[in-house]
Amino acid sequence: MSKDVLKGESRDGYVKIDRYNEDKIEAVAKHYKDILGQLGENPDREGLLKTPERVAKALQYLTHGYDLKPDEILKGAMFEEDYSQMVVVKDIEVYSMCEHHMLPFFGKAHIAYIPNGHIVGLSKIPRVVDAFARRLQVQERLTNEIRDCIQNTLSPMGVAVVMECRHLCMAMRGVQKQNSVTTTSAFTGTFLSNDKTRAEFLRLITASLD
């Protein structure tokens, strides 16, 4: 029977919590031991003895978004509020893995919505980003998924999402363009139909508070 294990490790007052499925870890680790051998390594040498298990745990963490329900995250902190101006949360850190090569891409997401009777706890928006990002992804779909989740759950007057990421599949292999940045955007409602509203959002996410 598959079972989840929750472990905590105390270190200088900090408790690291790891939640993983032992059966999945064991199954994935076996494959990675074979992969190491196929790459020409000796999986039984000291430095690699625990590598398959470590990789299996890392992959389970990096893809834990499959176990999350982003709409429920938002619904858990929705509040009725008579506020109809733009709400912007910018510079949200994004870490995901490209589904084509299983290499990381990372950067920032900038998100805005215009409430229509409901607002949401601000911390929930980065959590929604993380819930979708912690899956095998392409940046284009990730951008749309975040937009659609906020639109469908909050029913605001509009949603705007802009994402800027660096992709290691471009930097480490292929064209090897280390400084390239990919930008994607997705809009609904007022942000889609009103040029001034969209321009205000773009101005706000590029403005500095300094």
Image (cartoon, rainbow, N blue to C red):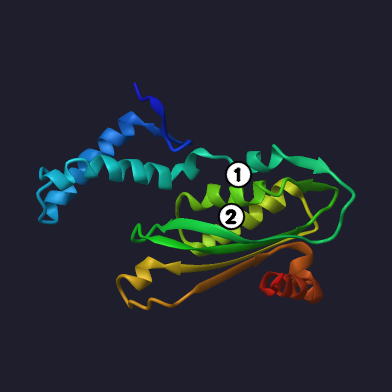
Residue shown at the point (39%, 27%) measured from the top left: 5
* 125 sits to left or right of 55: right
Q: What residue appears at the point 64 percent right and 65 percent down from the top-left corner? A: 186
The crowding category of the residue bearing disc 1, from other C-alpha atoms within 10 Å (few below 14, some 14 to 19, many at least 20), is many
Residue 195's quadrant in the figure? bottom right
Towards the viewer: 51 or 103: 51
* Amino acid marked by disc 1: Pro
33 relative to 129 in the view: left or right: left
State which quadrant residue 99 falls in: bottom left
Q: Do residues under tags 1 and 2 come within 8 Å of each other at their CB atoms?
A: yes
From the top left corner, tell me how far across and down residue 155 is, in percent.
77, 50
The location of residue 69, given as percent across then percent down, is 58, 40
Mark before the other along the chain sequence, 1 or 2: 1
| Residue at the image position 70 percent from the left and 39 percent from the top | 75
Crowding at label 2, few (<14), some or many (≥20) Cα neighbours within 10 Å?
A: some
- SS state under label 2: helix
Outermost residue to the front: 12
User: Where is mark 1, residue-wise?
Assistant: 70
Q: Nearer the viewer, mark 1 or mark 2?
A: 1
The C terminus: image quadrant: bottom right
Secondary structure beneath dot 1 equals helix
Of all residues, the one furthest to the right in this rendering is 82
Q: Which residue is mark 2?
A: 145
Q: In this figure, what is the number of numbered marks?
A: 2
Which residue is found at the position 47% from the left and 62% from the top? 106
